[in-house]
Amino acid sequence: MTTLRPFTCDDLFKFNNVNFDPLTETYGLSFYTQYLAKWPEYFQLAESPSEHIMGYIMGKVEGHLDNWHGHVTALTVSPDYRRLGLAALLMNFLEDISEKKRAYFVDLFVRKSNKVAINMYTNLGYIIYRTILEYYSGDQDEDAYDMRKALSRDVNKKSVIPYTQPVRLEDIDMN
Amino acid sequence: MAHQQGMDSALFERRLRPVYDNLEVGNNRKALQESEKLLRKHPNLLCARALKGLSLLRLGRYEESHSCLQVVAEEKPVDDSTLQVLSFCYREMEQLHKIVELYQHAVKQNPGNEELLAHLFVSHVRVEDYKAQQAVALQLYKAQPKNAYYFWSVISVVFQGIRGPESAIPEKRKLYLALAQRMVDKHIKEGKLETEQEAFLYLHILKLQNKYQEAWEFLTGELCAKLYPGAPVSMKFELLKELGNWKELNELLQQLLEADRDRWDYYKEYLTSCFELLKKTSSDEGTENYTLTTCHDFLLHIIQSSERKTRGPYLARLELHQRMRANQLPAQQLVGDFDQLIIEYFLLFGDKSCCTHDIALFLPSISMEQRQALAGRLLVESGISSTTLPQNKEHMQKHICALQISRMCGVHIELSVDHLLALYTALKLHYEHGYSSFGKQLLSTEMGPSDPYALLAANVMYDISMREQKSDQLFEALCLLQYVLRNSTSNFHVKLLSLKIYHMFGCMLGAQEMYDYLDIKQIQLDSMGYVHCNLLPLSGRFSGVRNCYDSTLKFFTNSYKERLEYIALTYRFCTFSKMEEFMNFKERLTNSLLYVACSVEAQLCDLVSCYGNVQQNLTSYVAMTIEPADDRIAWNELSDNRDLEAIIRWDPLHLVDAEAERKESYDQEIEVLQLRSLLLRLFASFIDLYHAPPSAKLALSNAKTITPAPAEDTATLELLRESWTGLHQRLRLMNYKPLSQRFLVNLQPTRLHLLLELPYERFFDDLAQLVLDLYTGASQLALQCKRVSENVACVMEICVQTITESNEWNGVDGLWKRRTHQQKVAACLEILSLYAFLLSVLNDKLQTSTKTKTKKKSSGDNKSQGTPHPISEKERSQMLQELMRQLKHKLEACDAALRIWKAPTLPRDLSSFMADMSLKPEVEATLIGDVSATFKESHELMVTELRNLLKDKIRIVGK
């Protein structure tokens, strides 16, 4: 049971019960403000009937020509509100807005080790499009999967023909 | 000249590069050298001069920087790089109006230059001058007819109507909004509306004028559908509500709910529309009859036709029940028995951890008796009794939910201590059983499924501790939490509660560990600072807590610097829907109470713990740029940014009023800040009287240095002293009550009562008189010296007595009063350390002036005409020496007490603590060993630090 609404600056003061989750990163302010200023409709929040923040999705739309696509930058759900289909709801929202913006596909990056998330995205219709080597830096660098789902504008599903060779971040044309 | 520069720009750019590079990496000295080198060859290269100004600014050489930048500004530069550097400097110095002037000049020389005009526009944005924004935006549009510029002018008109100085006048507001609408209307007519944000802005303007019908027509029209396909459906709700079109709203929501069956926002609006339709039916005769049966049937239809069970329609049914009861309508008759509905909900969704929050929503609407009876039934329904254990994770979660609800219904607080202890044991066993049965194969990022038992157990143990006024049970709870944390390393609830308990027990080291473990950063430093950073002042450490202030302040100063650039960003992307939100956010962030409080505490902390010789200490003091005469805190703008909901609680709903608790603590925190900032300013005025602020400080504010007339130089001090006693008087009259500590999650008490209890007021009031008498050589000086030394003795005694008391408490309960004792000792040492610093400065000043007979003496003579002869400087110096000698003595007495301050004895025999748990003995031993070691080490660190502090103060007054 959820209320979906745009994420606002004030929510930054209240999202701790979500952001204390170890897999959720708390970014610098300029990161959030940039997303809010540039793609306000791509930053949505799910609120419970008791007005707790249940989770949120942060994304953007970018790219040229047939690479015009929605991108999921962050998706997170508070531990108290898991197994309720919330991530799917937020993903649907982002796909829906990307449809409205006539994007060809939606993509996202996920840690290769994050089985739970990969499984969930697969269930939502995403395929592993390619592997990006050492995308996540840290104590131990980790590869990412670039996962994609074609939208209705991509009639021939050209955007989801997987790459077999892994790539490096610097070799990808992000646009 | 501009032209000439343009020709060589590539060359100059290459030459300037090293300066930029050095500035970038913070090598300011080298940057200065490079810029000077460049200026020798090209004295007219403005950008090099501007960079020199920036380097000087970064080096803290404000006066030189100022004149350097002034020279550049007077040249009225037009080239982009010079302008950029200058505006960067002005931004750094918060001289935002100068940026406006800068670009005004540049635009004058290059009328119609798009880039310069855009910079000018943003410079107006920074100072929130909407009228000027409007004018520049129109010039921009003339120069370059882009939609963005046109709408910059539209939004600037809107802001004049709703935020600018004239917005308070209704007629003006109306005029501006009408003008903004006409501007967009014209654009629409010309077919020039292009983006969704433009469409949003138009809707916004219409709504601001209450033109809901027009807004509705636009929103549902073709143009909006084309430009703004993602318009949130909530906009439709809002407009239909304003228009009173409940029927259409009702139908729209039914449609939406058919497709999206778990949306609480839809259900809420849907129910509202149903009740409005009902109201309408009963008031106008003519309309068709509406009854809530339709609503109920619809909800049942959703429930029955859903394949996957979602909470939505069930919660909506409960909400319908609740709203009907609130309107004295026969809820039970239509919807059914409330308890039965709750139980049904519990049976369906009790295995989800959010079930507790859901049920809690409806508890306040029923009586206490009904709540407790319901709680009992839920426990029965959970199928767990004293003889049965959960069969699986889901089963366990149901039990947890029932237990949480029963606490919320007030069942626990009515139990006797024995029963509570039994409950605790049961919870502990359930935790252990759940952990070993369902919690072993977790990812390190997951929380243990049985952790909530332990969290509840900690709350129960706190209840017992409060009733018995003893720490044993709470200490045991801490050990349990620490045990849970080993099994479930990512459970932040456990970390937050442990942090809380460590603070209650004054264990700084444990608290710091938990805080670090939480990895609080960025904006969390503001919203979560209340759990740690705000509790550090006077906790027992000084330099040891400086790191935490630093990281917090660093976040705030960075955000402060960038605060206006965020807003500029919304203009750049023409995000009209976010502009006001960003402006309000800026206010909230820059006026955070924690920001201001933390800055003041960090300064006090630095004054207390400065470790150099007198000259070094004075230099650090000057660098703080405290302006005693100037209260720089915007008291009415301060903002409470704490995220109090981050700490989970299940306390009895009828005893918890979170908003009242927030307000009470916030009010007290403001008063604490009043006391602390006034202490800081008063103390600074003592120093400034003898060590006049250097001209650099004045130069920054552009004032010519005038030596103050003798009567004026003590005016600030006298004024602040009056405020000081006045504030204390007011606070005593206000008679604030200490914050309630009934539940574990209640906010920690503020320092207000501590500050009023200890002799801060008298000490610094008398000290003020001493400083004045010493300055003028007044005849009562000797008397005042006596008074101050009595105060010193009194503070010393409090310190020594507190430590003795603390040692005595060790025989009874080593932790219960620990925090209070530490706070008292810290406060005493703060007072004495500040006093020591002051004496060292006074002594330094008097000694130099007795040696080199200054002119000051004669001015002092003039002043005291007609009064008895002032006491000679030599005598004053002797009296001062005597004060220092006495202080040294008292400091030594404090040190002696500190030396024998015992580490807290921990409650009971630790080895039996977890006997009930299926812990391996070695795990148990290391766990309790670790917790005990943390307490011991924390105490030792504190004592070592405090003794070092004293040692240093003894040194500076001992010379």
Image (cartoon, coloured by chain):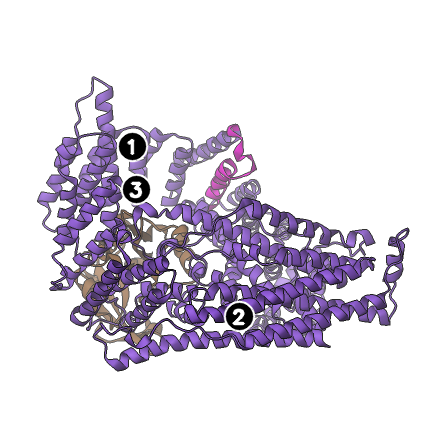
Q: Nearer the viewer, mark 3 or mark 1?
A: 1
Position in image of residue B559 (x %, y %)? 50, 59
Task: Find disc 1 in the rendering and name its residue.
Answer: B240
* Rendered shade, chain B: purple
Stretch of the chain drawn in magenta? B148-171
Position in image of residue B625 (x %, y %)? 66, 61
Q: Characterize the local packing of mark 3: few (<14), some (14-19) or many (20 or more) Cα atoms within 10 angstroms.
A: some
Label drawn at residue B829: none
Q: Is residue A47 left or right of residue B291?
A: right
The residues tagged by marks 2 and 1 sit, at their Cα atoms, a distance apart of 71 Å
Question: Upstream in the sequence, badge 3 or badge 1?
Answer: 3
Task: Look at label 2 and name its amino acid.
Answer: Thr
Q: Chain of mark 2?
A: B
Q: Nearer the viewer, mark 2 or mark 3?
A: 2
Task: Look at label 1 and name its amino acid.
Answer: Leu
Q: Nearer the viewer, mark 2 or mark 1?
A: 2
Q: Answer yes or no: is residue B692 visible.
A: no
Q: Chain of mark 1?
A: B
Q: Secondary structure at mark 1?
A: helix
Identify which residue is drawn at 32% across, 68% down: B476
Instruction: Compare residues B573 and B529 and report the one nearer the observer.
Output: B529
Q: What letter labels the chain drawn in brown?
A: A
